[in-house]
Image (cartoon, rainbow, N blue to C red):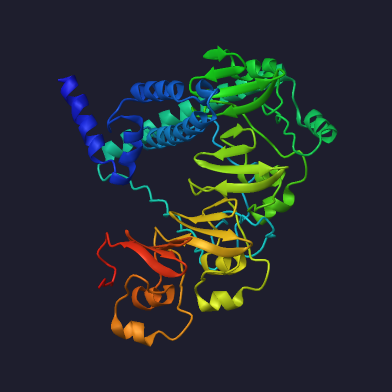
Amino acid sequence: MNGEVGRGAERLRARWVPERKLRYYRVLGLEPGVSLEELKQTHKDLVKVWHPDRFADDPRLQQKAQEKLKEINEAYEQVLSDAFPTPRLTPPVPDSPPAVQPEGRPAQASAGVGRYPPGPFGPFQTPPPPQAPLKRLRFLRNPFRSATGLGVVGLGALLLTLTLVLNNNDDSRRRDAVGANEASSSEKANDKPAGEYLPPSGPAFGLGSTKDEVLMIQGTPTSVEGNRWMYELSSIDFSDGKVESYANISRNLHVRLRPAGDSSAGRSRGYFTLGSSPDEVLGVQGTPTSVEGRRWRYESSSVDFSEGKVESYANVSRNLHVQISPVSDPSAAHSRGYFTLGSSPDEVLAVQGTPTSVEGSRWSYESSSVEFSDSKLESYSNVAGILHVQVFPAGDLSAARLRGYFTLGSSQDEVLAVQGTPTSIEGNRWTYELSWIKFDMGKVESYSNFSGNLRLRVR
């Protein structure tokens, strides 16, 4: 009987998994309704199989393993948070919440050009939806049920009070054992250069903490593999006996980083940008979920540094408070409402706002992307259909429009006159949905009308 009830609960839970989230289960090779133990064991097995250290002798395979492991970790975190929404021990929150902006949503990220100072929010960014108001508590009409409910609430309050008292006593003992306090921490901070992040006061460790400090706070590791300590699925890597990196996958690491210098400007502004320092990112975003060399992760999002400055980012989880603003006056492009081939990064920012991610000269807006060369738009791919991009013929092509089709040997202007702006342009290849046209010396050389949307004739 109990088995039937359990299977029924699993089927009920599986039925309510949205289609867009089923892909995370497929990455892990699991089905909705999986138990927490099976989920953790499967993730642990996959991490062992795809760990990049296994491919240290083959850089190509190691790169593929890193990408696969990133996909596995993202899927695990999504399934864990969706199917088993339990409170986390140390959620990555900033030391103080970012200031609320007067208008627009928190900025997303800075641009690949790397020279954009803080500025107003992008023109296409909209404020986040307001939080739903708290529902009013209503007493049940049945007085006996109401009294029972109040008794349960009172018992819960008593248990919560006892828990808080025990936790506070435990925290006091930990603080005494670690011997940390705010005064001594601030004195140490003055002796450290910017960019080195000291463990804060209280029961937490940070980059540069010793193994003894980690043991005092975390206790005995689940496993030890060389310089890597594992706590369930979370890991801590040491170098010369000091914490060098960590990954708080199981959200059970008591880790916290704080700025070594003054981060008040970034904190009051409420966002970081390309070229921001690690201190500014910490002031805005708080402690990262993981630190892997120059890459900091916040859940599935990431921030990459080069020479102590933000070089690129990927706002996958939409939790990065990042903003890129134009340097010059882009009012003309903003009023025009679109960009085109040859447009500057400022013009694209004025039309599209802050990119979802920046990787070198490539900016992404969800699934769409634009790419620059010498600070000019060279190519784009409007897969998500959200880019405000237009490409127009250079001359008068009324004859081509009247004819209504193009052919082999037609010019790019004739194709534009008949087909309009391509879905994507990559070098000499133009794409219209799934169909494509390839040019040679500015003339149609070949094509594939896979979507059946090309207006062409070949005689």
For the point 54% across and 36% down, the residue is 91
Image spot of residue 280 (x, y percent)? 69, 47
For the point 56% across and 29% down, the residue is 247
For the point 62% across and 73% down, the residue is 330
- Vertical order, 180 against 338 (above or below): above
Q: Residue at the front extreme?
A: 459
Query: As drawn, is 174 to the left or to the right of 74?
Result: right
Question: Looking at the image, which is closer to me, 155 or 22?
Answer: 22
For the question of whether residue 181 can be seen, the reply is yes
Image spot of residue 272 (x, y percent)? 65, 52
Place residue 385 in its image quadrant. bottom left
Query: As drawn, is 7 to the left or to the right of 151?
Result: left
Place residue 7 in its image quadrant. top left
For the point 51% across and 66% down, the residue is 124
Question: Looking at the image, which is closer to me, 130 or 453?
Answer: 453
The C terminus appears in which quarter of the rendering?
A: bottom left
Place residue 174 in its image quadrant. top right
For the question of whether residue 432 can be seen, the reply is no
